[in-house]
Amino acid sequence: MKLQGRQTWKFGSEVYLNSTGTAVGPMESEGPLGALFDVRYNDLHCNEKNWELAERRLMEDSIASCLSKAKLTNDDINFFLAGDLLNQVVTANYVARGNEIPFLGIFGACSTSMESLAVGAALVDGGFAQRVVAAVSSHNATAERQFRYPTEYGGQKPDTATFTVTGAGAALISNEPSPIRITSATIGRVQDLGIKDPFDMGSAMAPAAADTIMTHLKETGMAAEDYDLIVTGDLSGVGAPIVKMLLKEKGIDVSNNHRDCGLMVYRPDQEVFAGGSGCGCSAVVTYGHLVKELMSGSLKRILVIATGALLNPTMIQQKESIPTIAHAVALEGIKGGSN
Amino acid sequence: MSNKEQQQEYAKKIKPLQPKPPYFINCLKAYLVGGLICVIGEALMKFYMTYFNFNEETAGNPTAATLILIAALLTGIGVYDKIGQFGGAGSAVPVTGFANAVTSAALEHKSEGIVLGIATNLFKLAGSVIVFGAVAAYIFGMIRYAFKTLM
């Protein structure tokens, strides 16, 4: 049985993360991880006519660099799992129109990065696919337009607000040996502790992250110390201390090995309020930075928990609170390229 | 779905971990930015009265028009949103805030065309200001009219 407990998938030894690709905008290029990203634009428009096209370009670039590293073409891929933050996951749909790979659109807000990676790994492990590409994207200006105000509108944001990462990440999952194995995944439950402020998604998402981490450790029988890093997606400066507190209450101490992608992608002096967010946030940090650490051996085993605020502006105006979710994927580095 | 008690408990628990909004500093910044916009307006008014034969009653119109033009230009070159983040209500309440709301919506929806993009969305943010402005003007106009006829 590959199911462990109620919601954790334990993959066989034959599921690998073969290659990754990342593409980012100007703020992310200037951030501390800037040099690690494959494609970098110093213009938010990414040489395109509008914001939506810019986001599409980012996702296409991330996939192109992911596949070129693996020396594969679109025809070699069985399934393309992708999602983004826009209505009807348009970025993913239009990218899929272009690459003609059999496609499953996925939406889990900012948790889509690990959701697509987990589902892709399950397809490969179940023998339903040989090679899967999982990709996500987010763009600061398209997200502002979708969820908030026009980009040039002069509304004041509180310090708890997050800054949507302009970036895309793609990952190739297959049964062909590579230095990184995908070992398990825990699918999250939707949590809602009544936070209604769309400018404080860290507080809204922290309970979902804590629940998924706790469940993952319980169902896999692992301890928090077994992971070199436990990385949350975009809890930011507000949500990160909350998740640590929630876990501590349950007797889980992650104070030494917890990091948050939203705090890793930007420098503290960049004007991004509480930190980065968006599905591009966890994707570019995981696929651009963490996988390199796993390959070099400086990290052996990590757990990435992508957190998503399932936010809808109409629901917020109808005074609903924000449902949130978090999905975890465990990655393991194998020295020498095979086990 | 969590119940009310759990929600209240969570809200209480996370309160010490959330940054407190700097109300005093924000008020001070709003006062300075709003005040500065008014000083510019005052200077423009004096300018129109001195050089263009406007009097105190009529100089308001070209002054407002000039402020709107400046705010629209600052929005277009990507500066007004930074002033807004700093100044808060100080830059949102004056007529320049209204100009920014209209111009930013126009810029944002340019990609969907002139009619369905710009024209349809132009008053997306500023529309509520117009609605409540007109409603308030009507109500207070009627009150004033009633007083005038009764007195």
Image (spheres, coloured by chain):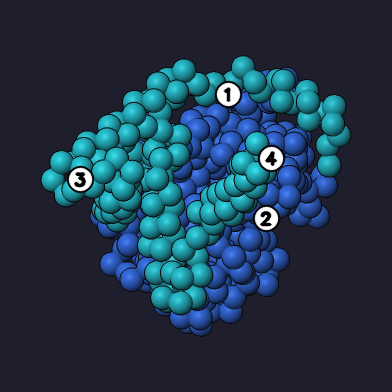
Chain colours: A blue, B cyan
Q: Quadrant of the C terminus of chain B?
A: top right
Position of residue A262 measured from the top left corner of the image (x, y, whole percent): 47, 39
**The residue tagged with tag 2: helix, strand or loop?**
helix
Rendered image quadrant of residue A263: top left
Dots 1 and 3 on the same chain: yes
The residues bearing labels 2 and 1 have C-alpha atoms spaced at a distance of: 26 Å
Amino acid type, residue under disc 4 in the picture: Leu
- Which residue is more in the foreground, A200 or A224? A200
- Residue at screen point 70% across, 20% down: B13
Q: Which residue is mark 1?
A: B18
* Label 3: chain letter: B
Contact between labelled residues 3 and 1, with CB atoms less than 8 Å apart: no
The disc at residue B48 is 3
Judge left or right: residue A27 versus residue A306: left
Disc 1 or disc 3, which is closer to the eye? 3
Dots 4 and 2 on the same chain: no
Judge left or right: residue A309 versus residue A299: right
Amino acid type, residue under disc 2 in the picture: Thr
Disc 4 or disc 1, which is closer to the eye? 4
Q: Which residue is mark 2?
A: A314
Q: Which residue is mark 4?
A: B150
